[in-house]
Amino acid sequence: MRSLSEIKGFGPARLAALAKRGVETSLDLVERLPTGYRDTTRPLSPAQMTEGVTACFEGYVVGKPVLHRARGMQWVSATVGDECGRVRCMWFNQPWMKDRLFDTQHVTLYGTAVRKKTGVFVVNPAQEEPGHIAPIYASVPGVGQKPLRDAVELLLSEYDEPDPLPGALRARWGLMDRREALYQAHFPQDMDRLARAKDALAFEELLLFQAAVAGAAGERREAKPLAIEDAWIDDFLRALPYEPTRAQRRAIDEVATDMRRPRAMARMVQGDVGCGKTAIALCALYLCARAGGQGALMAPTEILATQHLQSAVELLAPLGVTCGLVTGRMSAAERRRAREAIASGEWQVVIGTHALISEGVEFADLRLAITDEQHRFGVRQRTRLEDMGAAPHVLVMSATPIPRTLSLVLYGDLDISAVDEMPPGRTPVATRIVPEEKREGLYGFLRAQAAQGAQAYVVCPLVGGEDDLGGETRSATEVCRELTRALAPLRVALAHGRMGKAEKEETLGKFYAGEIDVLVATTVIEVGVNVPNASVMVIEGAERFGLAQLHQLRGRVGRGKRESWCFLMAEPNERLRTLAATSDGFAIAQKDLELRGAGEFFGTRQHGEPQLPAVMLSGDGRLLARARDAFLELEREPELAGERLAVHRAAAARFDRSRALFGRN
């Protein structure tokens, strides 16, 4: 293939814009798959555009379009129909559509039908030419859709890259040839070929990813075993203020067994918010300290690190373990004192933010490295903590329950402890779906809860100023302004990821201290600040979140003794009814996988880790099991040694055996 700079129209400005999106070579561009398609080969009748349907439809404009203005917004409405029925359409912030459409005009449109207060509408449908399937690429500022399509089509005509998978393997698993799969993924002849192409590319990614992860697992380093006695575990469990669950005991036993071995532990403890993962981490730190080593726990925020220190001091200090805190906001004197305590071994357990891995911090004998809310850290940060000791045991904590098959693919280099029971004392969270017309009633409920001394979260999918997502998606900034007026004199505040770190942490700290009644936020509150007094969670635009993420957000309340509530602001659908019906995080994650595909989970992986675009676009959760079966077959069958070697070589080339990516040295 020719280079990008040899393509007509791809000058320095366009090349720079593509480079910012990680597209630096022709292969990068070809493997940058469309994010969606507009299929106009089989238009529906307007009558078939029911709630939730995204499709092409055609019909005649019925009557004159109308331009509306209200609340600082403007939109055009029109009705499109045929002999079978009609559907209403709305174009937000596109006043010119009033003059582009006329009575009896035949139109072909593409859009999504949504339910609003007055019925079902297709919001912002695009006018299309019938009879084709057009790829839609993620936007690149300065590079339009047509130049991208033309460049990809040219490069695919010259594609001559070697196939990373042996032909016999493709044939055995019924996979499309890679060159053909790439072409059909960009320019499909029909939807069946598109589905087969996406599955072939996703299967390839999953297979190579597993091979790369297995390579990383094989690189675990030798470690000095810790002489842990069973009696120490009993001492810790007796010190807990509650009876541990069977799942906690099982995870603690697994961690202790790992740390007794001469090979560095690499284990993930995953489970719902509030399932008791912190107690497992504190037990591991206690066992490490009692065996003569130092342990470190890294948390993503200062508030969470401070809460962990408080828990550690309450539980471990009476057991004779010294604990200390390291954060970025310490004074120079405090920082110097902390570094001395760490370097001398005075602090057996060190808890902190990423300041733990800052220059000048040296451990006397780091034997256990724990990261909490692991998906919030880049892999290099986690690796840096591991590198501060001589092959320490590694434990990562995740509040995202993941189905077993997906866990084996995503984290094949880690042993997994699933904490699938909740400790006693957790308040059940009642979950309700609230349509727009009941908003005022919800505000009244918030006022009543605040009058009783309770606090509330209101979570929004947008900060403010983003591209339109359908006309009525409300941003956190807008909601905060509205609630400040509607709930006066309640104390309402805003927290989001674009704020400076100090400002955001200060706001979260005030909420934790009870100085804020209603916290309007984006998903920054997923990171686990424990606020027992917060008993109400309101999620705006709930249909825009994955089930697993909604479940995590719900877990922010119900942490105290108050009756707790989660309100999903959306029209009812199957996904949201699933969430309202169960509190089992693993069941919810499995349903999310079935409804939204593996991309829901791969899409939340931290920047710096492998990106799997074809997996993101394949909605077939069964593909995971097929790819897992194929990998196990390769690893187990002696007669497939040649194919196994080829796949591992391809994985090494694709992911560079990913020492930087997988966090192993």
Image (tube, grey):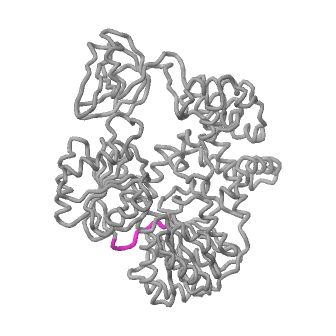
Quadrant where the C terminus sits is bottom right
Residue 174 seen: no
Residue nearest the viewer, comparing 262 with 382: 382
**Residue that sits furthest to the front in the current view:** 332
Q: Quadrant of residue 544?
A: top left
Residue nearest the viewer, comparing 380 with 489: 489
Q: In the drawing, does residue 524 fall left or right of residue 638?
A: left
- Dominant SS of magenta comes to loop
Residue nearest the viewer, comparing 633 with 428: 428
Picture coordinates of residue 192, whole percent (x, y): 57, 28
Figure check: 135 above or below 286: above
Q: In the drawing, does residue 553 fall left or right of residue 229?
A: left
Residue nearest the viewer, comparing 155 with 267: 155
Q: In the drawing, does residue 46 fall left or right of residue 340?
A: left
Q: In the drawing, does residue 332 fall left or right of residue 612?
A: left
The residue under the point 31% across, 37% down is 472
Picture coordinates of residue 126, whole percent (x, y): 42, 23
* Magenta stretch encompasses residue 635: no
Residue 31 seen: yes
Picture coordinates of residue 542, whole percent (x, y): 35, 46
* Magenta stretch encompasses residue 421: yes
The residue under the point 44% across, 60% down is 501
Quadrant where the N terminus sits is top right
Figure check: 470 above or below 278: above
Magenta range is 418-425
Figure check: 28 above or below 447: above
The residue under the point 51% across, 56% down is 402
Picture coordinates of residue 153, whole percent (x, y): 66, 24
**Residue that sits furthest to the top in the current view:** 104
The residue under the point 43% across, 53% down is 497
Numbered disc total:
0
